[in-house]
Amino acid sequence: MKIALIGLGSVGQGLLQILKDKAAYLEETYNFKPEIVAVGTASKGTLYHPDGLDIDDLLKALEARHLRHYPDVYGLTRNWDIPFLIHECNADVLVECSPTNLQDGQPALSYCQVALNSGKHVVMANKGPIAVAYSDLRAQAKNAGKHLLFEGTVMAGTPSIRLAMQALAGCEITEARGIFNGTTNYILTQMEGGMSYADALVRAQQLGYAETDPSADVEGWDAAGKGIILAAALFNKRFTLSEMSVQGITHLTAADIKAASEAGERWKLIVKITPEGGSVKPTRLPMNHPLAGVGGSTNAVTYTTDLLGEVTLVGPGAGRIQTGFALLSDLLEIARNPY
Amino acid sequence: MKIALIGLGSVGQGLLQILKDKAAYLEETYNFKPEIVAVGTASKGTLYHPDGLDIDDLLKALEARHLRHYPDVYGLTRNWDIPFLIHECNADVLVECSPTNLQDGQPALSYCQVALNSGKHVVMANKGPIAVAYSDLRAQAKNAGKHLLFEGTVMAGTPSIRLAMQALAGCEITEARGIFNGTTNYILTQMEGGMSYADALVRAQQLGYAETDPSADVEGWDAAGKGIILAAALFNKRFTLSEMSVQGITHLTAADIKAASEAGERWKLIVKITPEGGSVKPTRLPMNHPLAGVGGSTNAVTYTTDLLGEVTLVGPGAGRIQTGFALLSDLLEIARNPY
């Protein structure tokens, strides 16, 4: 399998690291021998070698912060424009993990379209294209006979989407409720321990969970984006951010937390989606609900199904290797079922 | 897909019910149109019709407690010996759900062998053959180019095995810890509410969770059997019951429960397996562990993995429809990947 990898931030580098560290295991266990033939980012240049790039050299060049540090080798092409690179390269799969843009999904959306147009499967960790244009992309992929996979867009590599679409196949899912934002869940857990919202936010920023501008997390927009993706995948419904009812955790006070605790309950920022719509809001859950026990930056999802009742999956929701694994797991699925 | 269904207790009937109720959904969503061509139990006789049996009539005959109540129709054969029936019928798949025998796996084990010998896939909810002879059966299935699937043997239809084998493919699982026995978990939950062990057991028996002879549950043997199956599936290791360190919940007292609770912990009957061995024992878990929040008759498993850390799945561990779904989900996998 030949791969074009666009976006070389922490997730893209996580995938490279896994492919390097687990090469022998993946070949032995799954007969999976991927080659990275093309890489690129908007700011660090692009590389293309039809016979494969060296992962060690790639990681070293990225440590030095630009692909110009990748050694010159016979047959290497540098600095093609990204859409041209995606179109012309001999990859079987585009792995898209450039930064997320939930407004119009660009530039990743056009990268995905170019890939499908030129006969490549698409795997992505980028939420933008799925949130904005899932139906169109799905139709395009179906017409092209190619996979469109995006496990990494919700709960990192914790297989929330694969659980719903494959392992629960045969069940009808009528509702999903999830804790999809680790930053806010970490803050709420700290507040239960007695910390104020402001202090907990600072701690989250110190640990790298929260951005300097934390509004996408604490106001619920990141969680809403994931809800939109799940609604697309589970129900084939397109909700826009403006159609979701979104409320963050910024108004929760220490007194609210304490009142819930005294009633044997816990506040969680819950994303809820059904075929009819979606919402993000702080919700008091009884202590014995599986989502109530999910602490720190961990994520979780509860699917309500016709045949099994509630099924809950708990696992990491972020991280370089954890999200890199989501990409690997999509690639392994393509290797298993080439279509 | 033509199916031979051996064992018509609650799980077998659960599958029939699902195939009846969801026929239109399964055809529309997965293009899945199964036919039951053969059924049988040791005590209720057998039926074979190469063009398919009527599920409504089957369910009615089973309500009347014997297959002789199935109407006579042209082409129907009655009362073939079960192994002969499995061998001779035109089914693509044997669904084995006769009663579990953890000692020698019989008679189900020989049914499975006959099925594989005569070119049929095998799907089972019966723990016996997998616990006793997984390696041999797996080798036989591989040689025959047939599937050997057994999602229903652990946590009913909650996809514990499919999660490990497929959705987490690419990760290495180093340990599994689970709550695999709903009866004991129900009793422990009641004891936390202040009930004595004896009263909680009676309540569990009244609700139908516990057998009249509850020893297989409360002494940990049922849970151990599931640990053996997971060890086989995850690590390709064969542990026998006598090699497992098994301790039940019969010695736990109200004082033990209270002491844990005061320390912010909870007792759970935990099955733990690693490539080196397995154990079943009452274990005190900190309240913030995902397994600590699993109450009542619900089951759960936590996989420790190299790339994701801990991933936990929570869902039903028993039930007619819930286990029937496990069989359906294995059948859908065969339909998706005929080999």
Image (cartoon, coloured by chain):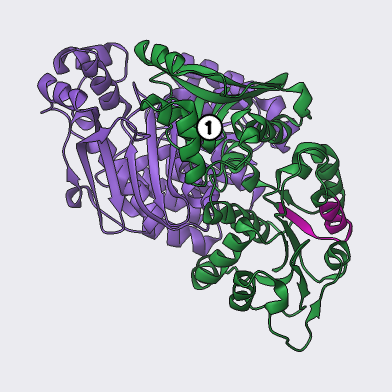
Chain colours: A green, B purple
In this view, which residue lies farthest toward the bottom?
Answer: A74
Q: Is residue B80 above or below residue A196?
A: below
Subunit ID for the residue under disc 1: A
A231 shown above or below B105: above
| B241 displayed left or right of A298 | left
Residue B186 position, x and y percent, is: 29, 21
With B81 as the anchor, is A39 left or right in this view?
right
> Quarter-wise, where is residue B91 in the image?
top right
- At label 1, counting other C-alpha atoms closer than 10 Å, the crowd grade (few under 14, some 14-19, many 20 or more) is many
Q: Is residue B32 above or below residue B252?
A: below
Question: In the rendered structure, which segment of residues is drawn in magenta?
Answer: A110-123
Picture quadrant where residue B293 is located: top left
Indicate whether residue A112 is drawn in magenta. yes
Question: Image point 19% across, 12% down: which residue?
Answer: B195
On-image quarter of the C terminus of chain B: bottom right
Which residue is found at the position 79% from the left and 30% from the top? A238
Q: Residue A302's spot in the image, x, y percent? A: 53, 28
Residue A204 shows in this picture: yes
Q: A187 left or right of B154?
A: right
Seen in the picture, residue B50 relative to B167 is either above or below; the reply is above
Helix, strand or loop at mark 1: helix
Is residue A314 at least partly visible in the picture? no
Q: Residue at x 52, y 19 (%)?
A: A252
Residue B175: x and y in percent read 34, 51
Magenta highlight on residue B8: no
Quadrant housing the N terminus of chain B: top right
**Kind of residue sitting beneath label 1:** Thr
Q: Which residue is mark 1?
A: A184
Number of numbered discs visible in the structure rendering? 1
- List x then y, in percent, for residue B71: 58, 19
Q: Nearer the viewer, residue B193 or A104?
A: A104
